[in-house]
């Protein structure tokens, strides 16, 4: 499936930051309050909302505090087959090559 809506990593990060900012505002929390509840520094939280930049563990803490963990589960799951034809046409899983013998 070809996606025509290609976004850069920066675009995706800003979009995620904007959505989490909306969750914060919906709860009427300040940035400092959200940072404290998540266990991240206020400076890190403010930078995240402004630029989309944040460490992965800090992002996960924020996702947990806003009770959005269930949205992470499907992110990197292997696709499931809907038909037997799909199962047959999918490329096989790559495996490591055997070790080379030293000469």
Image (tube, helix red, strand yellow):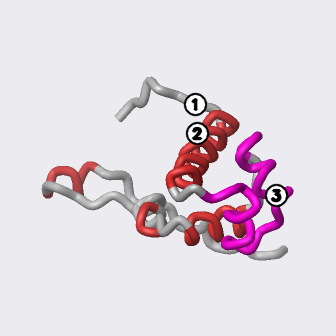
**Predominant SS along the magenta part:** helix
Name the outermost residue toward the top.
Answer: 4
Q: Secondary structure at mark 3?
A: helix
Q: Nearer the viewer, residue 80 or 90?
A: 80
Pointers 1 and 2 in contact (C-beta within 8 Å) = yes
Q: Nearer the viewer, residue 86 or 31?
A: 31
Vertical side of 40 occupied by 82: above or below: above
Q: Quadrant of the C terminus?
A: bottom right
Residue drawn at (43%, 67%) of the image: 73
Vertical side of 12 occupied by 78: above or below: below
Residue drawn at (48%, 69%) of the image: 67
Cα separation, mark 3 vs mark 1, equals: 24 Å
Residue identifier under label 2: 15
Q: Nearer the viewer, residue 13 or 39?
A: 39
Q: Nearer the viewer, residue 53 or 24?
A: 24
Q: In the drawing, what numbered circle is on residue 7?
A: 1
Q: Secondary structure at mark 1?
A: loop
Neighbourhood count class around disc 2 (C-alpha, 10 Å): few under 14, some 14–19, many 20 upward: some
Residue identifier under label 3: 44
User: In front: mark 3 or mark 1?
Assistant: 3
User: In front: mark 2 or mark 3?
Assistant: 3
Residue 23 screen position, x and y as percent: 52, 53
The span picked out in magenta is: 29-52
Quarter-of-image position of residue 33: bottom right
Residue 43 screen position, x and y as percent: 85, 56
Q: Earlier in the sequence, mark 2 or mark 3?
A: 2
Q: Secondary structure at mark 2?
A: helix
Vertical side of 81 occupied by 22: above or below: above
Cα separation, mark 2 vs mark 3, equals: 17 Å
Task: From the viewer's perspective, tell me whether residue 8 is left or right of residue 39.
Answer: left
Pointers 3 and 1 in contact (C-beta within 8 Å) = no
């Amino acid at each position: 499936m070809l996606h025509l809506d290609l976004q850069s990593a920066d675009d995706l990060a800003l979009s995620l930051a904007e959505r989490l900012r909306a969750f914060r505002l919906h709860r009427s929390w300040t940035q400092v309050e959200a940072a404290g509840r998540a266990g991240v520094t206020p400076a890190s939280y403010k930078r995240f909302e402004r630029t989309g930049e944040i460490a992965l563990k800090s992002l996960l803490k924020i996702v947990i505090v806003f009770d959005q963990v269930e949205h992470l589960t499907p992110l990197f799951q292997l696709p499931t087959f809907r038909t037997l034809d799909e199962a047959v046409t999918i490329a096989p899983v790559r495996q490591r090559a055997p070790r080379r013998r030293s000469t």
